[in-house]
Image (cartoon, coloured by chain):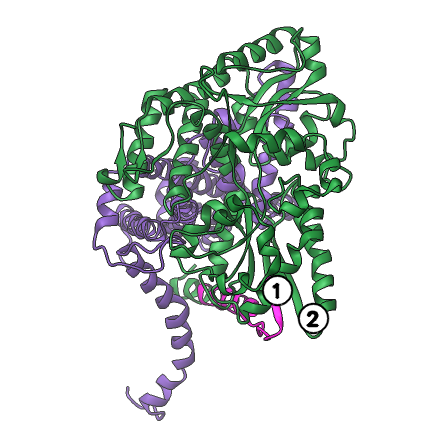
Chain colours: A green, B purple
Amino acid sequence: MRPKHVLAALTALALTTASAGCGGSGGDDSDKTITVAYQKFGAFIQLDAQLQNVKKEYEAAHAGWTVELVPIEAAENDYYTKLSLMNRSPKTAPDVMYEDTFLINTDIQAGFLAPIDEYLSGWADWSQFTDAAKAAGKAQDGKTYGVPMGTDTRALWYDKTIFQKAGLTVPWEPKSWNDVLAAARTIKQKVPGVTPLNVYSGKGAGEGATMQGFEMLLYGTKHTLYDDAQKKWIVGSPGFNDSLGFIKTIFDEKLAPDPQDALDPNWGTKVNTELFPTGKLGISLDGSWTSSTWIESGSKPWPQWTEKLGYAAMPTQNGEAPGKTSMSGGWLLSVGAHAADKKASFDFVTTMLNKENTLKYDIAAGQIAERKDVAADPRYLESNPSLEFFTGLVDVTHFRPAYPDYPNVSNAIQVAMESVMTGQAPVDAAAKTFAEQVTSAVGGPDKVTTAS
Amino acid sequence: MTTATAPRAARFGAFVPALLLLVVFFAGPLLWAVYSAFTDVALTGSAEVNFIGVDNFTTMWHDAQFWNSLWLTLVFVVGSAVIGQNTLGLLIALLLRGRNAGTRGVVSGLVIAAWTVPEVVAGFCWYSYLHRDGTLNGILGWVGLDQNWLYTTPMLAVILANVWRGTAFSMLVYQAALNDVPPELHEAAAMDGASAWQRLRSVTLPLIRRSIVSNLMLITLQTLAAFGLIYVMTKGGPGTKSSTTPIYMYQESFQFYKLGYGTAMALVLLVIGAIFSLIYVRLIKVDNL
């Protein structure tokens, strides 16, 4: 193997790779095409199904236009990464994108999104959106960058049969974290072969671990993540350590799934398509959309869920008022900053989010409606027995601090959870690492506070 | 000597397209990477890019996780490439020397088959083999030794997988090199009463030392940058137990959106690769490679 040959081989390789790369970007962006980027992954297939229909509807109504759907098949964190990569070049940036509300300020600062205020003022339906919904798409600069598709809340789902076997009262109404732990311990003792309590944790579950897992605990303590008055991130609060402590307890006592299972990126899919339907899971801290997996159009139809499963609000740490807590997020459809025809792209958004399509989507994807006309529609109200319960949690819900640094903070939380659940670090050390990581990520010690 | 009739310029002209391609596809990205390493370029969250000098490198210096990743990378390179692939490749090549065509064909075929499997496929094969519900545990379960190898011994798992996958390359290099060793030398040494080990140490190894250096360099550089295999098998986990520098780099660049920091790490990795190469050249005393 002479150097000369190596060089020749490398050159050949590089040329092949490079020319292969050229093929991908060669596509001519015709003026009359709207590209729509969105996520399609695991049990989340409802958006894809609906967009296929809306594409036909839009193309039929707008002669000459083509809608090009770009489903990104990736887990949540990888979806954000891939979307950002697409957005970094005007050539690949989508015209319309499925955007998580917590990333909106981040992506605006990066110059990925276009404000849509001028189009919204001419859209009669906009008045149907609740004020909270309108605020979800509004950025720090006061402009609106997206139309909400629906929101969500989070709570404890539980298997009534397992509860009865364990001798626990149904309906279950835990009043504190200890009540939750006590129920899980009873299940572990009385019903072998069942995972007592699932709380998403670690990097595998991505933002799901931060929000469905950690923040559902943290926002039930006296502390939060961000001090709005001081405009600083809170690190090292007692509530933070207590929340990590809860995670440690459930993994140490084996109330939670095996860490190796919980760290699998496909864990969330497994929980809802396998464990719950086969009666192998006692309690799961999960989102209001969870039942969308089990309805007829879901990825694992399981009509019996309405009888088998119950839901209870997540209690605050020691039952502090208002006694329960929840977290809300939600997704938007946004218009890309590089969209060739922003009006046409916005028209696609309004087609997808008109009353009929929002109704269909909110039912299929288990979303809590943010359009008043949808929320009042009997078809919506009757579609899912859990809807009333989860809509009720809107009163006690919290929102994530959707600042550009949030994704970094969220990632640091996942790292802290993972080191605690795997036993690699005690709570104090993990909280200290978190404080260091956040301090460096948000730009120095003057951007964080320990008191709250 | 200078009887060439073609003018210099014309001869040079023939190289221009190739040179241009090299500049565009090699030098371009490389220069961009060097530049980015000194900026705070982010995947998202900021539209402007600031030149921040050596900040990324000072951060790295104080970043315990980076040092941990560097150590794991070292373990991975030494374990899977220098010791695993290199030694095993040489051993197989030596053992196959002088065997009949059938044996050579079957053994080489099997080893090379592992090499031709795409990285991701190899990763998933090992994932399903070592996983808690995997084949290995199916067998070990009989004696009660079953466990999730990816969880309990993540580094060993990825090192084994990389040895399995990469040995073929070393084997091919050494087979070619051994073919060039004149049999007469062996015979002469044997006549002088040299044992098999002495012949290997004093005759064969010195004669193939250039191949050893090239092989070590190539596999070291390949292994330093190994990403897909580890990512598929463990994603760097559990925790950070198999988070080698490329994995940590990916996490910082694409999950924490710090592209600048990630590229700075890539630059450090490049320097480490160069150091390894220098060590090999010195150790094996190759005067004219």
**Mark 1 — on which chain does it sit?**
A
> Between residues A9 and B228, which one lies in front from this camera angle?
B228
Which x, y percent locates residue A55? 70, 61
- The residue segment tinted magenta is A10-35
* In this picture, residue A261 sits left or right of residue A202: right
Q: Measuring 75% from the left and 36% from the top, which residue is drawn there?
A: A382
* In this picture, residue B77 sits left or right of residue A159: left
Q: Measuring 35% from the left and 84% from the top, which residue is drawn there?
A: B12
Which residue is the site of mark 1?
Answer: A347
Which residue is the site of mark 2?
Answer: A62
Lower position in the chain sequence, tag 1 or tag 2: 2
Measured Cα–Cα span from mark 1 to mark 2:
10 Å
Q: Is residue B151 above or below residue B101?
A: above
What amino acid type is highlighted by mark number 2? His
Q: Is residue B247 magenta?
A: no
Dot 1 and dot 2 residues touching (CB under 8 Å): yes
Which x, y percent locates residue A354? 66, 55
Magenta stretch mostly in which secondary structure? Answer: helix
What amino acid type is highlighted by mark number 1? Asp
